[in-house]
Amino acid sequence: MRATQYYAPTLRQAPAEAEIPSHKLLVRGGFIRPLTSGVFTYLPLGLRVLRRVEQVVREEMNRAGAIEVSMPVLQPQELWERTGRWDTFLPQPLRSEDRTGRWFCLGPTHEEVITDLVAGEVTSHKQLPLNLYQIQTKFRDEMRPRGGLMRAKEFTMKDAYSFDADWEGLDRSYQAMCEAYLRIFERLELEVLIVEAEAGSMGGRDTREFMCLNENGEDTVLMCDSCDYAANAECATSRVCEPEALEGPGGVYERIDTPGATTIQAISEMLDMPAQKMLKTLLYQADERFVAALVRGDRDLNETKLQRATSAEQLRMATAAEIEELTGGPVGFSGPVGLPDEVEIVADDEIKLLRNAVVGANEADAHLVGVSVGRDFEVGRYADLRQGAAGDLCPQCEDGKLQAQRAIEMAHIFKLDTRYSEELGALYTSEEGERKPMVMGCYGMGVSRAMAAIVEEHHDDSGIIWPQEVAPFDIVILLLDPDKTELAEIAENLTVQLEETGYEVMLDDRDERPGVKFNDADLIGYPISVIVGRRTEESGEVEVRRRDGEEQVVAVSEALSAVQKLAAQA
RNA sequence: CGGGGCGUGGCGCAGCUUGGCUAGCGCGUCGGCUUUGGGAGCCGAAGGUCGCCGGUUCGAAUCCGGCCGCCCCGACCA
């Protein structure tokens, strides 16, 4: 390919709205252009990279026995009503109506479509297991698109769905996907960590995320500093540590005035007492009833955990009016002592060990000091309700502590069980002649996000350093002075020779100054460049240079083998 | 959706506080000459309803109101 006949517009300055390296470099390098918030055009270079990432994914999926299909983006409301997700899927799918008033959504995921398909096609255990996947554009009306391709409203995802006769089969399918994913990320040169995760809108169990540790990621991973425990902070758990018991007044607690102290921090300062010796009481409406959730003062409540502990379908914080009615006191002074019986108290496991704590008095401007569980109030149920945080004790080993790291969620896999197959009638007849729902798994991977993650992980001050597997071109030939016909001829011959060997080659034959070409080559991130210039004229030599540093000067006739040698070292 | 910031030729910005003549600067673009190993120099040129609507005023990029868009932080997710 000749640069003069290509479209690869680079920008000297990054647009003001881009902040993270991948966003800046992908725009500057001429890979993508924004259309509107969270929506991008792939320019020729960007499309090449995307296609090559897809190809890596495709090859490894195929190798793992999955079979590629392509499902519709446009999906009818009726189908989503059958799983009850039309109104509950988050983030809300983008929807629209056709001219007859039927509603559709732009597919944010394809459990419904694939299960409906399989339900109509697969009927025998002899057809199982089956793993179908696609690489396709997904639409999600994200609350906040961010970081260019990192989180977009429209993005490319690989989604696979496995159908098995039983749980043992699902375990095998799941394991095969895990292994395929590890191979994919290895080829993409992304270091990933498998962590425990939440299932979210998808449902399911044994869900795992493949995380790429990176400061520009949107997730936080908590990982043990001494064993292999790692989990997304949104579901991480920890071993309960015993806080030092407070020296309290013994038999009874005491009511004290705490004017205006509506936050733990305020009371902590007022009483000069650490927050972990206080007890935080949060009132929630869980479906039709109210619950009081208790966590240590220095802890945050994890709502997902509370929802699970209460088995509530809908969970929301109580309003100020509800709090006053239930507790008799205003917001900020709630406590577990003297709550009405209909309010169930659900406490975090750490509360079991808290003695002589400070709690709200359920009246304005007052707290109770020296309150203990079991003596002054009863807990209906204990559960893990606390938000995991750095410094927590590892739940898996004896002496580890959890460390927090930012991470990019590259992929998410789920064991779905039979929820969708039951709701959508994906049944098969077993060897024994029984009709049974298929056991499903689903396996998502962000393909366009992977492109962004690769840039986050592989760049320097001058630009992108693409791994060879996904580079838009393998080699750029920098023809520094295209007006010199003998040099142009050498460069063109080299281009043909390298292309015939199987490389994708960009010949930079533009009438630009050498500096411009060097800088663009660095920015775009071609893994290897071959420089045809003054040295070639003087001594018949070219420079063969790897983007990440190494360089050789060889005779023109040796260029091919030098390229092959440098490529092999990567 | 809550909080913050921004919107001025293709890109990056100044001007706005304290309203006033032809709206500037750098980069890029087009033409010409000279240059050619890390984003060249000189000469010439094109390109802007100052996000949109309304208001105040003799006069609005500038002041006021509303709306729209974009980015960042937070609650969701590949």
Image (cartoon, rainbow, N blue to C red):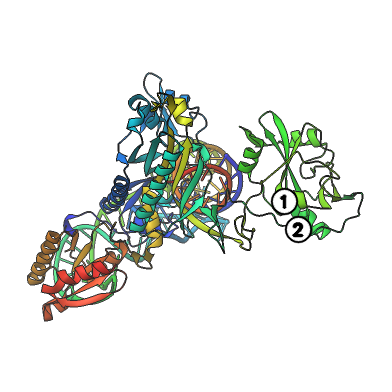
Determine contact: label 1, label 2, CB under 8 Å.
yes
Q: Residue furthest front?
A: A432
The image quarter containing residue B12 is: bottom left
Which residue is found at the position 34% from the left and 50% from the top? A33
Residue A154 position in % (x across, y down): 39, 42
- Residues under labels 1 and 2: Cα distance? 9 Å
Q: Is residue A117 left or right of residue A4?
A: right
Can residue A248 be seen at all in this image of the molecule?
yes
Image quadrant where one finds the N terminus of chain A: bottom left
Q: Quadrant of residue A246?
A: bottom right
A482 in relation to A160, above or below: below
Assign the C terminus of chain A to one quadrant of the image. bottom left
Q: Is residue A530 visible?
A: no
x, y percent for residue A475: 21, 63
* Residue type for callout 2: Pro
Going by the numbered disc 1, the residue's amino acid type is Glu
10 Å crowding of disc 1: few (<14), some (14-19), many (20+)? many
The residue lying at 79 percent from left, 34 percent from top is A326
Q: Which mark is residue A243?
A: 2
Q: Is residue A335 above or below residue A314?
A: below
| Numbered label attached to residue A474 | none
Which of the two discs, 1 and 2, labels the residue nearer the N terminus?
A: 2
Q: Which mark is residue A350?
A: 1
| Residue that appears at 86% across and 45% down | A375
Q: Residue at x 31, y 52 (%)?
A: A53
Subunit ID for the residue under disc 2: A
**Residue A188 vs residue A273: left or right?**
left
